[in-house]
Image (cartoon, grey):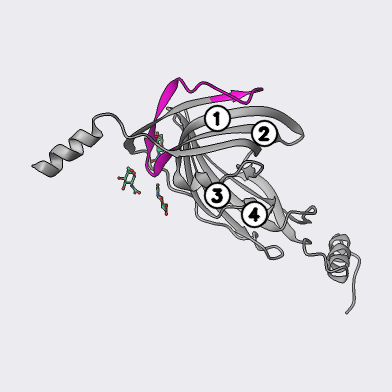
Amino acid sequence: MRITRSPQLGLLALSLLCTLLSLAQCLTCEVCKHSGPSCKGKLKLCEAGKDACLIVVGLSTTGGIESVDTSKSCMKYKHCYSGFISTSLGQEEHMVSNSYCCQEDGCNKGSIPTPKNNSTRNGLRCPACKATFREHCSGKEPVQCVGNETHCVYFAGTVYAGIVRTKFAARGCASESACNAQVGGEVPSVTYTYELRRADCVPAPQPPGWAEKKLTLSVH
Ligand SMILES: *[C@@H]1O[C@H](CO)[C@@H](O)[C@H](O)[C@H]1NC(C)=O
Ligand SMILES: *[C@@H]1O[C@H](CO)[C@@H](O)[C@H](O)[C@H]1NC(C)=O
Ligand SMILES: *[C@@H]1O[C@H](CO)[C@@H](O)[C@H](O)[C@H]1NC(C)=O
């Protein structure tokens, strides 16, 4: 084999070193972040402990404005969730995301479908709020859950945006899939990374009157 000098050489040398030392966690992933349903970036060697490649495509609606963003990165496999997540943190703050995790070199190079926004209210409500610089918020304003959002979540911890880090708290409606998030885990969103110190996820309470309504319906 002839090895020519190229920008890839450093990466190649590192992966050879990885193989020689038979380190379990030497993975290369595509890394990028961009608006739109996909992004292209360089293959990078993941830092130690990050043993999965991830793609997240998020569709967010804030104050009636929709935007689609994609990010590709390295992740810890045990914190990596593949699938659809929907959250509403306020009446005008909806976000759906599709994620895909995999564990082979460069396996996140492709693209995945943009998630579908379902804005149909499902009758459930959750306390909602968002805060930065602190790890709690009161959730006095309820939010109407939409689509698949059957659970109420309360997430808090630290949010990283590049080199900036701050405390955060967020409450609202979420699909059951959001219950996979664990305390101590890292939750990648398209723009930020959240490190969780609180990750409550409970079924949304049935609105008052539903039990009777169902009963009446079944009686008739
Ligand atoms: C997505 O949801 C938001 C908020 O409910 C809504 O305003 C918007 O029209 C929806 N978009 C589509 C394509 O359904
Ligand atoms: C959207 O959400 C509503 C309420 O949960 C549900 O009845 C409906 O089937 C959903 N539509 C799609 C296209 O998934
Ligand atoms: C609802 O959830 C299912 C699986 O839980 C998912 O496949 C589907 O895309 C979701 N649909 C919407 C738009 O809420």
Mark 2: secondary structure: strand
Mark 1: secondary structure: strand
Going from N to C along the chain, the mark reached first, 3 or 2, is 3
Residue at image point 55% right, 22% down: 137
Going from N to C along the chain, the mark reached first, 3 or 1, is 3
Front tag of 3 and 2: 2
Going from N to C along the chain, the mark reached first, 1 or 2, is 2
User: Which amino acid does the dot numbered 3 rest on?
Assistant: Pro
User: Which amino acid does the dot numbered 2 rest on?
Assistant: Val
Q: Locate residue 21, reporting x and y percent.
A: 88, 68
Q: CA distance from mark 2 to mark 4?
A: 19 Å
Residue at image point 67% right, 33% down: 159
Mark 3 Cβ inside 8 Å of ligand 1: no
Q: CA distance from mark 3 to mark 2?
A: 23 Å
On screen, residue 4 above or below 35: below
Magenta span:
130-151
> Which of the two residues, 174 or 67, is positioned nearer the viewer here?
174
> Which of the two residues, 137 or 32, is positioned nearer the viewer here?
137
User: Which amino acid does the dot numbered 1 rest on?
Assistant: Ala
Q: Which residue is mark 4?
A: 78
Going from N to C along the chain, the mark reached first, 4 or 1, is 4
How many neighbours does mark 1 have within 10 angstroms: few (below 14), some (14-19), or many (20 or more)? many
Q: Which quarter of the image is occupied by the C terminus?
A: top left
Q: Which quarter of the image is occupied by the N terminus?
A: bottom right
Look at the image and say whether residue 144 sits in the magenta stretch: yes
Q: Which residue is mark 1?
A: 170
Looking at this view, name the residue that lies furthest to the left.
220
Q: Is residue 13 left or right of residue 85?
A: right
Q: Which residue is mark 3?
A: 37
